[in-house]
Image (tube, rainbow, N blue to C red):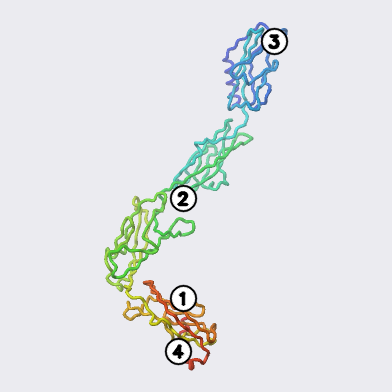
């Protein structure tokens, strides 16, 4: 490259015309062709002037002129470089050639004029710099195919050096990108994108000289925004991820309770209303709802826009149909193949007109202290103490949905679902007295009622003949 520039320079010189006056002291000169490295210091030698006229040297005056004359000064018959700390010879600023003229005067009469052509020899004194318009920020779709060229960066070196591009692998998101042709600056997608997991990526790229010993380089921080693409299916709310950090939902099962008298109402469900959202939250496509199965010949209707489910007519009988199970589908309006299905369970309950009630507010019983692990609480008539509620919603008064519990829970006593109290006998002491609260809850209606149980711990023999008691204990001890 340097040889070619010098050849061009000589061609320019040959085409330049100059005038030389051969008579007198200014004779014998010629055009000056020289070179100097950029960043050379003040006083750097450029060339010697080959002019005769030694006999009348005092009558000769040399003068520098021309567009680059201020870059030179004369020291006798020598031309030197004129620079300073604030004025550095920079090839990238001044160009590749300095052009000036040397004029020789004798007694203030111009006798000859010569061209001065000085090539500025390049030095590697510049680093590559990225072009701002090529380094983003960028935005790409999450649907962009792996191995696609997503953008191209470009850096320039004022010295004209060749540049190689390198992705900094210590960058947090470097794994998403690669460079196949290091000299091209083309960035290739190396890993699938997912807007639902990451909205933004960042990495550092280096531009480095590849044909110099210095290997000067520079870096740029690249920012890539990921745009949402329509690649997710709708899902029902609330969303339960299949695993932490995985944007895939397990659809909930919606449940509600009705009675055989319920009709023409919008049903309310748990854990919330029937509602779905587009999995691509950045797009949020419109959805449509429909019933796939279980509507019992049009007994249910769904609002295809809101997902509200309406019971249009009453259930004929609870015993015939204890519950309904519906499949509800939601899909995108623009793409019916993107859909999701949830189950809806409608339970038909007995009509609840009357709350459950205990036949008394306080029950009394006793335990005989012994070394036996467990004992059943008895009444003072040597009957098993049984605390039960009655419910007038049932013909026999027995509500099968009642569940009994102690509140608060006790380490010494337990109540069975038949309302029988069992005690850990070996932890009791003579003459102890315990007041317990038994809660009866209707699991269908949620209604609760409570009663107190007053229990005394008696010494062995206090109650007289206890053979009947121990026989009953043997029967019930397995229910603990």
State which mark lies toward you, 3 or 1.
1
In the rendered image, the vertical position of residue 191 relative to residue 291, given as above or below: above
State the residue in front, 332 or 471: 471
Q: CA distance from mark 3 to mark 4?
A: 149 Å
- Number of residues whose C-alpha sits closer than 10 Å to that of mark 1, classed few (under 14), some (14–19) or many (20 or more): few
Q: Which residue is mark 4?
A: 380
Q: CA distance from mark 2 to mark 3?
A: 82 Å
Q: CA distance from mark 2 to mark 1?
A: 51 Å
Classify residue 117 as left or right of residue 419. right
State the residue in front, 269 or 322: 269
Corner quadrant of residue 41 = top right
Q: Is residue 149 visible?
A: no
Sequence order check, earlier mark of 3 and 1: 3
Q: For mark 1, give the secondary structure.
A: loop
Do the numbered discs 4 and 2 sit on residues whose CB atoms are within 8 Å? no
Q: CA distance from mark 3 to mark 1?
A: 126 Å
Sequence order check, earlier mark of 4 and 1: 4
State the residue in front, 430 or 224: 430
- Number of residues whose C-alpha sits closer than 10 Å to that of mark 4, classed few (under 14), some (14–19) or many (20 or more): few
Do the numbered discs 2 and 1 sit on residues whose CB atoms are within 8 Å? no
Q: Position of residue 430 (x, y in %)?
A: 54, 87
Q: CA distance from mark 4 to mark 1?
A: 24 Å
Q: Which residue is mark 3?
A: 52
Q: Quadrant of the N terminus?
A: top right
State which mark lies toward you, 4 or 2.
4
Classify residue 318 as left or right of residue 3. left
Q: Which residue is at the far front? A: 361
Q: CA distance from mark 4 to mark 2?
A: 73 Å
Label disc, if present, on residue 194 of the rendered structure: 2
């Amino acid at each position: 490259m340097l040889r070619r520039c010098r050849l061009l320079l000589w061609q320019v010189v040959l085409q330049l015309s100059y005038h030389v006056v051969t008579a007198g002291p200014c004779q014998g000169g010629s055009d000056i062709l020289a070179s100097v490295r950029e960043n050379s210091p003040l006083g750097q030698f450029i060339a010697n002037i080959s002019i005769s006229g030694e006999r009348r040297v005092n009558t000769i005056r040399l003068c520098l002129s021309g567009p680059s004359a201020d870059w030179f000064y004369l020291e006798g018959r020598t031309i030197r470089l004129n620079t300073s700390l604030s004025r550095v010879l920079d090839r990238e600023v001044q160009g590749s050639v300095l052009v000036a003229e040397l004029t020789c005067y004798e007694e203030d009469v111009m006798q000859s004029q010569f061209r001065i052509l000085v090539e500025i020899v390049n030095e590697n004194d510049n680093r590559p710099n990225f072009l701002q318009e090529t380094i983003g920020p960028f935005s790409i779709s999450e649907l962009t195919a792996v191995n696609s060229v997503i953008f191209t960066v470009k850096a320039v070196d004022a010295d004209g050096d060749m540049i190689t591009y390198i992705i900094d692998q210590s960058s947090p998101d470097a794994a998403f990108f690669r460079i196949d042709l290091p000299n091209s600056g083309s960035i290739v997608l190396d890993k699938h994108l997912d807007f639902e997991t990451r909205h933004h990526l960042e990495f550092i790229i280096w531009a480095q000289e590849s044909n110099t010993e210095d290997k000067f380089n520079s870096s740029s921080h690249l920012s890539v925004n990921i745009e949402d693409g329509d690649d997710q299916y709708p899902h029902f709310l609330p969303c339960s991820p299949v695993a932490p950090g995985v944007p895939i939902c397990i659809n909930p099962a919606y449940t509600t309770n009705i009675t055989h008298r319920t009709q023409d109402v919008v049903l309310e469900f748990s854990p919330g209303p029937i509602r779905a959202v587009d999995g691509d939250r950045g797009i949020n496509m419109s959805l449509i709802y429909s019933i796939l199965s279980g509507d019992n010949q049009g007994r249910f209707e769904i609002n295809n826009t809101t997902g509200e489910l309406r019971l249009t007519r009453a259930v004929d009988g609870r015993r015939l149909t204890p519950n309904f199970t519906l499949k509800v589908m939601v899909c995108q309006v623009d793409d019916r193949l993107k859909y999701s299905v949830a189950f809806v369970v409608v339970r038909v309950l007995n009509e609840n007109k009357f709350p459950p009630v205990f036949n008394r507010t306080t029950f009394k019983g006793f335990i005989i202290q012994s070394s036996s692990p467990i004992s059943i609480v008895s009444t003072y008539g040597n009957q098993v103490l049984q605390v039960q509620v009655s419910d007038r919603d049932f013909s026999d008064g027995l509500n099968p949905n009642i569940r009994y519990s102690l509140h608060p829970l006790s380490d010494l006593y337990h109540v069975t679902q038949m309302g029988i109290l069992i005690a850990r006998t070996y932890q009791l002491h003579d003459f102890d007295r315990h007041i317990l609260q038994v809660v009866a809850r209707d699991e269908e209606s949620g209604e609760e009622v409570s009663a107190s149980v007053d229990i005394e711990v008696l010494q062995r023999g206090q109650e007289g003949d206890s053979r009947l008691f121990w026989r009953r204990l043997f029967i019930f001890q397995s229910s603990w």
